[in-house]
Amino acid sequence: MSFDQEINTLILRYLHDKYHDQYAEWTIENIRVQPRWRRVWAFWEAKCHYEQNGHFQQLENAPPGLPSVWVMERGENVNYRWDANAGEYVFLQKVTKEECKAIYGEF
């Protein structure tokens, strides 16, 4: 399975699980034709929803000691790094939807 297929499959599962009434009839084709930035953003949301690969719904859900974690907070994808000296995650960077759109574009 290609990376795009993997992304599209996870996004579709997420939309069906979280927004079933709105996206119940959607298929992979509906995902595939969305602008790239929307697919990337939805992929990040899905990873946070399912708490996969260092992505979490809340920072409190992240186990201590991961080098880096991402959390969807207030409509932003926020990256934290583990500070071993402090024994906690500290803010590193964030990506807003507008920044995601600027990075990944409409193609």
Image (cartoon, grey):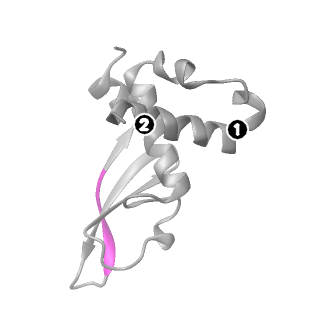
**Viewed as shown, does residue 63 lie left or right of 67?**
right
For badge 1, the amino acid type reads Tyr
Q: Is residue 89 magenta?
A: yes
Q: Is residue 58 magenta?
A: no
Identify the secondary structure beneath mark 1.
loop
Q: Magenta stretch?
A: 88-93
Most prominent secondary structure in the magenta stretch?
strand
Residue at 37% from the left image edge and 30% from the top image edge: 4
Return the mark for residue 37: none
Quadrant for residue 105, please give it. Answer: top left
- In this view of the protein, which residue sits in the foreground, 12 or 107? 12
Observer-side mark, 2 or 1, equals 2
Q: Position of residue 30 (x, y in %)?
A: 56, 19
Q: Is residue 82 above or below residue 50?
A: below
Quadrant for residue 91, please give it. Answer: bottom left
- Crowdedness near tag 1: few (<14), some (14–19) or many (≥20) residues, C-alpha within 10 Å: few
For badge 2, the amino acid type reads Ile
Residue at 25% from the left image edge and 69% from the top image edge: 67
Q: Is residue 105 above or below residue 48?
A: above
Return the mark for residue 19: 1
Q: Position of residue 44 (x, y in %)?
A: 43, 44
Q: Position of residue 57 (x, y in %)?
A: 53, 59
Identify the secondary structure beneath mark 2.
helix
The residue to which callout 2 is attached is: 7
**Viewed as shown, does residue 64 lie left or right of 29?**
left
